Amino acid sequence: MEHPATSGHVSRESTDGPILVFLGPTLPLAEAQQVLDAVYLRPAAQGDIVLAAHAFRPRAMILIDGQFEDRPAVRHKEILWAMAQGIRMIGTASMGALRAAELHEFGMIGIGLIYRWYRRWTLAPDDAVAVQSAPAELDFLPLTDAMIDLQATFSKLMRDKLISPEDRCKLTQTARNMNFRDRTLKAVLRKANWADDASDRLISGISRRKRHDALKALQIAPRLVASGPPPRDWVWRATNTFVRDIEASGIDQMLLELYS
C-alpha cells in the first residue's frame, strides 16, 4: 500500500554537493582518501542514506560497505528515494555491489567484477561478500576474509600451479561450509589439513577482489557523476512498511517529504 503523503514526491537534481562514500572494512580510509576527495561515512544501515542526504545535500553517494547485524541493512527503498531526489547512486565491492545488482534496472550504477557476478547469478549468496570487522574505533579493520576473495585466491593459486584443481575444489567447499565470521584463508587451509608451513607460503598470495572493485569505483566516480543521472521512467512511492522502518530507526517521516 502506498503512503499518500509521499506518493510520487520528487525533488530537484543535486549538482553542486559533495560525493559521499559509505566505507568500512573493504578499504582503509587513508587509502580511499588518496584516490577520491569525498565525505567518508561509516558503513550504511537502515535510514543512513536519508539522514546523510539531508545532512550533506550530496550530488552522489558511493555505497561500498553496509551494516547488517547490529542494525537492519540499508533498504532498497531509501536508495530509490535518493535517486528520486536526483542523487547519483553507485554501488560496488560489498553491500554496494549487492544493492546495485538488485537495483540496476532502476538506475543505480554498479562497478566491478563482484557487481557483475551478482547480476549474472541472482541467487548467489549474500554472505559471499560478508566479513567480520573491528568496531568503528578501530576503523572497521577486517578480521576475516570474504568468500569472494577466497574463491579468487584459490583460482589464482591454481593458475600459478601452487595448488591442484582438486585442491581448489576442496578448499572452496571447505570455505563455503564455514560461517563468514570464521572465514580466513589460514583457517580454511588448517581445516583442510594443510600444514602450517605450506599455509604460510600461500597466505601472502591472497586476492583482494573487493578492494580492487572499491578502488576502481572511487577512481571513476567523478566521471560518472559528471554525466548526470540517467533518465528515470519510474516514480518513487513510499509504502507503509518503509515508513514504519524509517520511523523505527528514529527518523521523522517528514524527511522523506521535505527535500529540496
Image: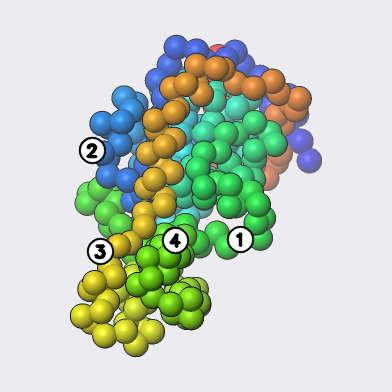
Mark nearer the N terminus (1 vs 2): 2
Estimate how packed mark 1 is, as few (under 14), some (14 to 19) or many (20 or more) residues with alpha carbons within 10 Å: few
Q: Earlier in the sequence, mark 4 or mark 2?
A: 2
Mark 4 residue element: helix
Tell whether label 2 touches label 1 (CB within 8 Å). no
Residue wearing tag 1? 124
N-terminal-most mark, 3 or 1: 1
In percent of width and height, residue 209 lies at: 41, 52
Of the numbered discs 4 and 3, the one sitting upstream in the chain is 4
Q: What quarter of the picture does the C terminus occupy?
A: top right
Q: Give the labeled residue for mark 2.
A: 30
Which residue is label 4 attached to? Answer: 152
Identify the mark at residue 204; answer none if there is no mark. Answer: 3
Amino acid type, callout 2 = Ala
**Does residue 88 appear left or right of residue 4 in this picture?**
left
Residue positioned 59% across, 13% down in the render: 12
